[in-house]
Image: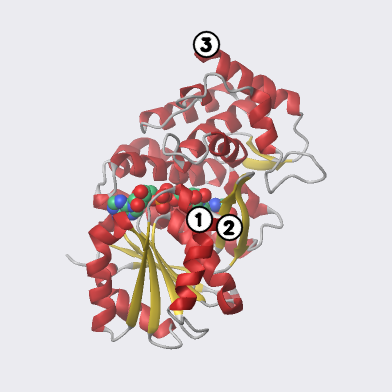
Amino acid sequence: MQTGPDVVDVALGDRGYRIHVGANVLEMAGQLIAPVLRRKRVAVVTDENVAARHLATFTASLDSSSITHDVITLPAGERVKSFAHFETLLDRLIGLQIERDDAIVAFGGGVIGDLAGFAASVLRRGVDVIQAPTTLLAQVDSSVGGKTAINTRRGKNLVGTFHQPRLVLADTSVLKTLPRRETKAGYAEVVKYGLIDRPDFFAWLEANGARVVSGDTEATRHAVMTSCRAKARIVSADEREAGSRALLNLGHTFAHALEAEAAYEGRLLHGEAVAIGMVKAFELSSRLGFCAAGEVARVRRHIADAGLPTSVASIPGFDAVHPRTLLDHMRQDKKVRGGRLTFVLAKGIGHAFIASDVEEEAVIALLGEDLAAAA
Ligand code: NAD
Ligand code: GLY
């Protein structure tokens, strides 16, 4: 039986919006987008992989709702989240005479979502953005919540804005063309919600995660919906990360340092870095006496079963990296306050908390043992 998309509402008053999740959302995109437009004109920002596979379906749907569109296609990959590409994108949007009443559609993974969202937030002091995420990672995390960013030479996501989308369109059928490695990377962010405060969801993932990773339609829909509901709830409670939203950064203090050290190259995907980071966060929690070793083992086992890396040493080229180099990257983390690192730790699966008083030496020791295991 063909059913319509599921809906999650992000409750943010007059900045609130709807997330549509389903297998036929792209074909309905024009109909769903039209009501939120001030003028029936959009600029679609996408990347070359997404354009080759899904752009025709998307633009046909815009055509059928008489929405005029221009398309800007960028190279694929994390390195597009840079000042250079940001400038080029803005220049092209201005060249197309995108006006304040027009909208930008970010049609792609988290890279396109973050870059196009950032451009939308500053173009002519802000135009509307619609997120149409095409990776598992973007559907369960980056398209929701309004964080936009680019990377700088000194670190990940260090320049950006909060700019909530007007609408999120998550078509789960486009995930069928996603390379398996990317699906697994996105799965790491799904696991994150279970680890933060949904032990029941983590248990469901232990039983059904393999179905999500292999692209099973129903399991994927359930995982995307549960993740979007979890993220919507956290964002509604703390839009600008004054407190509890920081829990969404579980594993990210480690992950961002690893990505910076890997120079945003394809040898380490964001989701893979998050997978390693979550294992390290649980190991650190155990080491500091917060979390039982059995819980850490359960987390590590599930992440490994999903085909994701669990150690820093497993990253290609990291055998000669010194723990203090990684700690230096961590000092650029946006959660640093008064020079003190903040970590998201856990008292067990589903019981994450924010810790701003972690001794650096404990982190160094943990990373040192990980890297020494490879030697
Ligand atoms: P990505 O955007 O680079 O996409 C991964 C790869 O998949 C790319 O090569 C892309 O071209 C390709 N692709 C995308 N959709 C496809 C499809 N349907 N079929 C085939 N190929 C497809 O990476 P990502 O994992 O989606 O996003 C990672 C980024 O998201 C990171 O920069 C991270 O910092 C950011 N992020 C942001 C937030 C936020 O709240 N803003 C949250 C989590 C992650
Ligand atoms: N991905 C972290 C956040 O949206 O806050």
Measuring from the top left, give residue 295's x and y in whole percent.
54, 28
Note whether residue 270 is visible: yes
Vertically, is 109 above or below 361?
below
Q: Amino acid at mark 3?
A: Ala
Q: Quadrant of residue 242?
A: bottom right
Disc nearest the viewer among 2 and 3: 3
The residue at 33%/83% (across/down) is: 68
Q: Are marks 1 and 2 in contact (CB under 8 Å)?
A: yes
Q: Quadrant of residue 346?
A: top right
Q: Amino acid at mark 1?
A: Ala
In front of the other: 2 or 183: 183
Secondary structure at badge 1 equals: helix
Relative placement, left or right, of 64 versus 125 is: left
Measuring from the top left, give residue 348's x and y in whole percent.
58, 34
**Alpha carbon distance from label 3 to label 1:** 40 Å
Q: Which mark is residue 234?
A: 2
**Alpha carbon distance from label 2 to label 3:** 41 Å
Q: Amino acid at mark 2?
A: Ile
In front of the other: 33 or 222: 33
Circle 1 residue: 230
